[in-house]
Image: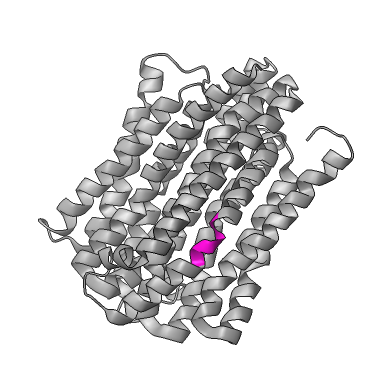
Amino acid sequence: MEVKMLRKEFFQYVILNICGMVGLSCYILADTFFVSKGLGANGLAALNLAIPIYSFIHGSGVMFGMGGATKYSIYRGLKEYNNADKSFSNTIHLMSALAVVFMLAGIFFSEKLTILLGADKDVFHMTKTYLQVILLFAPAFMANDTLICFVRNDGNPKLSMIGMLIGSFSNIILDYIFIFPLHMGIFGAVLATGVAPVISLVVLSRHWLTKQNQFHFVRINPSLRLAGNIISLGVPSLITEMASGIVMIVFNVIILHLQGNTGVAAYGVVANLSLVVISIYTGIAQGTQPILSRVYGYGEHDSQKQILKYALKTMLVISCGIYLIFLLSANPIVSVFNSGQNIQLQQIAVTGLKLYFTAIPFVGFNIIISAYFTSTEKALPAQIISLSRGFLIIIPMAFFLSFLVKMTGVWLSFPITECFVTLTGIAFYMKPERGKKNV
């Protein structure tokens, strides 16, 4: 592809997708803000304990969306249109089956899950309520995540962005209405979050109503091979999303022991801001994916490298800007979420912001390089990178460093882990380059 056209398409997809992903991440940030105003530190703690389950649901939807849409784009690049439709249909079957499992968990196991997540008597009821409603809305979350990916890969990134933004803004408005005028408490916060993807799906339906879609649901016998391929390509995205949930669970356990519910509430501020920052990098990664998959299908190796270069340069510029903001404005940022003027919460969260977010350039690189490998059907390196971030390194690192230097160790375990994973990602990328093989 011509360089100027490639660059123009890259920035079109990435800018639209960043806007959409930041909007999508504001689901939880809006909850954090309004819950802190309406329900105080205990409300924040309950929200933070329940959020990992949302990460699993959202991650599952993104897994099917990214895996299925990647395969769809590759087939269209190869002009195998029938197989492209089969990819979409298999994806919908897989997504629907898992969504039912999440709903059943919400109906029958929400209380046990609340206990497992570590909620004490002060926050048990609020945590259980948030958890149960989130699980019952799992089909809406997952369908929205999946169809956003397909609509974007079908040449309509603008509609994907509009769907994400309208859904997110609806959540913010409903949060305010349900928590304050209607006094619905934590149930109001989670109900607003659950309704938002339904509104987004209504917006996305325009892609079909105007007959713009090139993917179609066809009657098929589910293919285990294709399903395995879709899941394999989508697992890195699942793990990337789950990493936030896993890290939050581990950090909640450690911080409950070190600083109690106030510490968990402080970490909730940092972690939820982190979701927004990570969404920017996810926006870059998912914005590059349709183009990467297509040029990979065409066999254009130089174009793949050029897109990766654009993505990494964009990430580094954004990272510098974000960290400067947190470094210079940590105190007022935390104050926005500290409506009770809790001095201990303020001190813990301000320190945490400055240490935790030293990780952001490494996080950005890891998310982008993982998406690069996924988009070019290199599932194994992407899975190793994602597993290292979400499980293999971060968990032992958090326990080890918190044992050595308490809360400082908790904050530093995240950047140190991401730095190690970045070195792994560079090694994976450079190895085939040395062998002069297509990446």
Quarter of the rendering containing residue 207: top left
Who's the residue at 54% across and 37% down the image?
286
- Residue 350 locus on image (x, y percent): 38, 71
Instruction: Using residue 8 as the reference point, say whether residue 212 is left or right of it.
Output: left
How many marks do you count on the picture?
0
Residue 380 left/right relative to 70: right
Question: Where the N terminus falls, by quadrant?
Answer: top right
Front residue of 123 and 436: 436
Residue 400 in the image: x percent, y percent? 63, 80
Can residue 356 be seen?
yes
Q: Quick check: is 379 in the magenta stretch?
A: no
The magenta stretch spans which residues?
356-360
Q: Is residue 344 above or below residue 47?
A: below
Whether residue 94 appears in this view of the structure is: no
Q: Position of residue 232 (x, y in %)?
A: 68, 43
Q: Is residue 21 above or below residue 306?
A: below
